[in-house]
Amino acid sequence: MLNSPVLTLNTGMVPIDICNVREAVILQVLKKAEAIKVDENQRIRSQYLSLPLPRVIMLFNFHKIPRKKVIHSRLNIIYRDDMRCQYCGKRYSVDELTVDHVIPLSRWKEMPHNPPFKPNSWENQVSACRRCNTQKGNKLLHECHMELIKNPVEPQYMPYLVISKQKANKYGWIEFLKYNVRVVDMIDTM
Ligand SMILES: [Zn+2]
């Protein structure tokens, strides 16, 4: 029970971290945080205290929202694209998506001028379902009559926390996950 996760909010009620019950209780005892949501049916008891099990805590002295540097990775390309295939526009799970090179690597040399980006970059890589990726193959967009649903660019900002929907439901966090969090169907290592 002491290792159960606890959602940690900053002073502005923005989720910034996940700690465990043990850490959350220490923060409460030190008056550095207060419990915003508890499980009344379970209590933390020791010689000196008895507290309902915290599920969400708010830190008193932390105003910032930590921002993550956006690392160029397969997973972040998929998250940037909101888990949608950028050709057919359908939403998939992370597992079902691939990353497609808009200008295929094998065709890079044919580009008349050097494009203002690199082959392996935010600008040339998009999420694609397997079907669209296969259909596109090593063709250029006009050759296969396919279009991108949006122009791929480097993201300026990514939510700091990635939390699975299952976990959020299990611990009653959903109502607190409006900002700074990406709620996903399944969790990947990021
Ligand atoms: Zn598709």
Image (cartoon, rainbow, N blue to C red):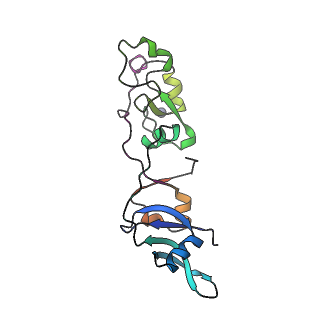
Q: What residue is drawn where x is 35% and y is 32%?
A: 151
Seen from the viewer's position, the closer of residues 66 and 80 is 66
Residue 71 image position (x, y, % from top left): 47, 41
The span shown in magenta is: 138-161
Q: Quadrant of residue 44?
A: bottom right
* Residue 182 highlighted magenta (yes or no): no
Q: Residue at x 52, y 58 (%)?
A: 165
- Quarter of the picture containing the N terminus is bottom right
Say above or below: 137 vs 89. Answer: above
Residue 157 image offset from top left, x and y in percent: 38, 46
Q: Main secondary structure of the magenta part?
A: loop
Q: How many circles with numbers are drawn on the protein?
A: 0
Q: Position of residue 27 (x, y in %)?
A: 51, 74
Say whether residue 151 is magenta. yes
From the viewer's side, name the closer residue of 118 and 107. Answer: 118
Nearer to the camera, 131 or 140: 140
* Residue 144 screen position, x and y as percent: 43, 19
Relative to 85, say whether 179 is above or below. Answer: below
For the point 41% across and 48% down, the residue is 158
Vertical placement of 179 versus 68: above or below?
below
Task: In the displayed orientation, state which residue is furthest to the bottom.
Answer: 47
With respect to residue 172, does 52 lie above or below? below
